[in-house]
Amino acid sequence: MAERSRRRLWWLVGGAAALVVAVGAVGVVGVREATADPGTGMLRLAHLSPNTPAVDMYATGPDLPLTKVAAGVAYRAVSPYLTEPAGTYRIQGRPAGAPESAPPLFDVAVDVPAGSAQTATFVDIGPNGATQAQVLDDETAPAATGTGALRIVQAAAEVGPVDVTGTDPTGDSPPVPLARTLFYGSATPYATVPAKPWELRVTSRSGKSSSVEVPVTSTSVATLVVTRGADGGLATQLVADAASAAPTPAPAPGAPAPTPSTAPRTAESSVPPVAPGTQAPPQPSTAETTTSAPPAPKAPTPPAGGIGAGLGGLSHAGLASGGIWDTISGWFSDDPTDGVPDAVKMPLAIATAPPPGGPHPTSLSIPAINLDVDDPVDLRVDYRGALQVPTDFSKVGWFSSSAVPGDPGSSVMVGHVDTRRGPAVFGALDDLKPGDLIEVGRSDGGTARFGVDSVETFAKDGLPTERVYGPTTTPTLRLMTCGGPFDDATLNYRDNIVVFATPR
């Protein structure tokens, strides 16, 4: 408990210290080192409401009593991350200096899945300009070597939509349009740019403009927050997101080594050594070797361990299904988030930066459990070495380093089993039976069809990495979620459920 108290105190002191930078300069907000505990998630707060005075932020949730976590937070402030057990947290804001018993200015519930990182923002876009909470998903996987990931958050109210363009001062790279017509209270997806200093020009439709130099470093992930300065002009600040705020831990003893590349070898690399004084036998040309070789299965570097994909809404005999149970349980529940409205997702603008190329899954349909979802989100390996999970409990995610469904290799898709209130997208995954049909739509217009071979349960620390992520010479599909007993101490399921499927 002493360590948890120190973490909360650090946030209390650091939360009010976020740097606000005027037009023409950028300051990077300090972010505390995050823990690599697999049962935790990260949450920070951003005060983006110019009409709301400075507030004291309170939080309560699993193993966290109502605690003042940041004092005197004013418009433009972004707190460091708070790392706590996965679960649902109640966030309240009271006027700075007001007692804990004072009515909150805002009061919302935020779900924090294991391994996720989120920013809870407060913006003036509710009815009649009221303050409303919006949650923004933060990237937990580093950008590729030699590049950085950058997104824009529009927090400058009453200046109209803004455009943001990145320019390489050296002229080596073409201009990058990072945002177009970005309205207050919305954000862009992350854009990938070469690691180098960039000049970002922010212009509003009301005629205001600002230029700022952003040093994008290799593998960095950051957010440029555009706000309204004290003089009414535009101000900016750069904040490091979770992937850059938390160090990548060293591989655990016994963790699988990165999988070697399976790209076809050239004729030169296939030539056996020749003894001195002898003539090498004729070898096929490189073109002959590569054209005759079969397509190589995609072999990703396997993530470490299992996934955390549930909050325990099904852990008590499946009763958390809404209706009369919600009413009855509310009479006896000590859950501080009961009856508290959920924070909504911050809307994302369409990025004008070029999207990654190549085919990808566009839908998942499983008729046996009445599942039909579109637009799977891309998942990567996060800063802990674990596979990300979707932060939207209604979404399915695709491990983008695995095979495209229908191509040779193992394709991995992940979804949550439940929320705190009941089933999520993969809530009925363990009801599947051998032979059940699974269909995955593809961006190239095709449909990959699979049949279930088996549905198996593994302890998270005993997940068979090779079976799930290992290369295969034919198309295979693995669907993953949480299962088994729910551990009230860690607020996480102990097992993972894996569906193994092959083409039909």
Image (cartoon, rainbow, N blue to C red):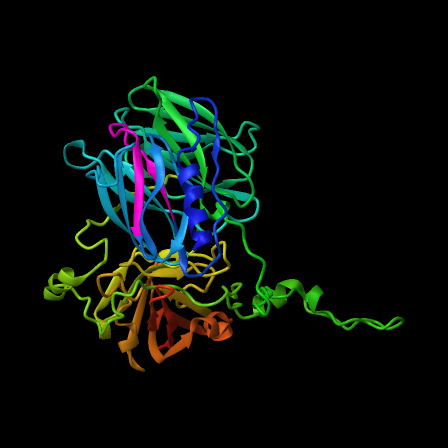
Q: Residue furthest top?
A: 231
In this rendering, the answer to whether 75 lies above or below 271 is: above
Displayed quadrant of residue 311: bottom left
Residue at 48 percent across and 69 percent down: it is 469
Q: Is residue 45 magenta?
A: yes
Is residue 30 positioned above or below 20 on the image?
A: below
In this view, the residue in front, 271 or 100, is 100
Residue at position x 21%, y 70% in the image: 370
Q: Which residues are magenta?
A: 43-60
Spot occupied by residue 177 in the image (x, y as percentages of width and height): 41, 34
Do we see residue 276 in this rendering?
A: yes
Question: Residue 185: where, in percent of width, then height?
Answer: 28, 36
Q: Nearer the viewer, residue 350 or 33?
A: 33
Quarter the N terminus occupies: bottom left
Classify residue 135 as left or right of residue 178. left
Q: Is residue 418 above or below residue 130?
A: below
